[in-house]
Amino acid sequence: MQRLTRQRNAVFSAFSDVGRVLTAPEILSRAREIVPEISLSTVYRQVSLLLADGEIAKVELPGEPARYEVACKPEAHAHSHHDGKGAAHEHHHHYFHCSNCGQVFLLHACPGPMDDLAPKGFQVRSHEVTLHGLCAPCVKAGAGKHAS
């Protein structure tokens, strides 16, 4: 575990009450509210340390920049799910990606086991779900009304 520094605290604090995953530039913007002089290279350095310590997790969507979220602690697996045979699976999140503003939000539910969707005889070991569309602020702003 790395020692707590002002920069590390600012980077980690960027995630509080945000309700979505963040890119490094978004972390920088929020961290500057605490440490105005923090740089993007310092954010990347702190993100790397927080990843190594298991404090945050990397979220990767195809064709998108890496984003980060606070990692779930094993003892806090309120959202872990079971395979119906008693085996608990590693906690995971699902996401909503706004196709207008590009932000990625956490979904607060899991559809559960996907075994019924797999071909007969196949065994599902894990799944990822990303919904794509417009977030509430973009809907309210009228984004997509003129989409063809």
Image: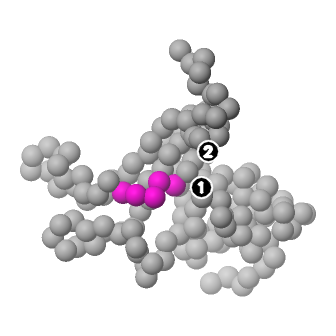
How would you rate the neighbour count of disc 1 (Cα within 10 Å): few for under 14, some for 14-19, many for 20 or more? some
Type of amino acid at the residue the image marks with label 2: Gln
Q: Is residue 67 visible?
A: yes
Q: Circle 1 sits in a helix, a strand or a loop, which is it? A: strand
What is the residue that sits farthest to the top in this orientation?
148
Residue at label 2? 103
Please report whichever mark, 2 or 1, sits nearer to the chain's N-terminal start.
Answer: 1
Find residue 50 and name its label.
none
115 left or right, relative to 133: left
Residue under the point 72% across and 58% down: 27
What is the residue that sits farthest to the left in this orientation?
121
Type of amino acid at the residue the image marks with label 1: Arg
51 left or right, relative to 44: left
Real-space CA distance between mark 2 and mark 1, rounded to the nearest whole angstrom: 8 Å
Q: Quadrant of residue 35?
A: bottom right
Above or below: residue 137 compared with residue 7: above
Q: Circle 2 sits in a helix, a strand or a loop, which is it? A: loop
Which colour scheme appears in the figure?
A: one colour
Give how far across and how far down residue 142 sits, in percent: 64, 27
Residue at label 1? 20
Give how far across and how far down residue 26 sits, in percent: 72, 53
Give how far across and how far down residue 114 sits, in percent: 24, 52
Image mark count: 2
Magenta segment: does it hold 141? no
Residue under the point 84% across and 68% down: 34
Q: Quadrant of residue 55?
A: bottom right
Give how far across and how far down residue 94 sits, in percent: 44, 53
Look at the numbered discs 2 and 1 and tell me whether their residues touch, using CB distance below 8 Å. Answer: yes
Judging depth in this view, the residue of 90 and 140 nearest the camera is 140
User: Magenta span covers which residues?
Assistant: 106-110
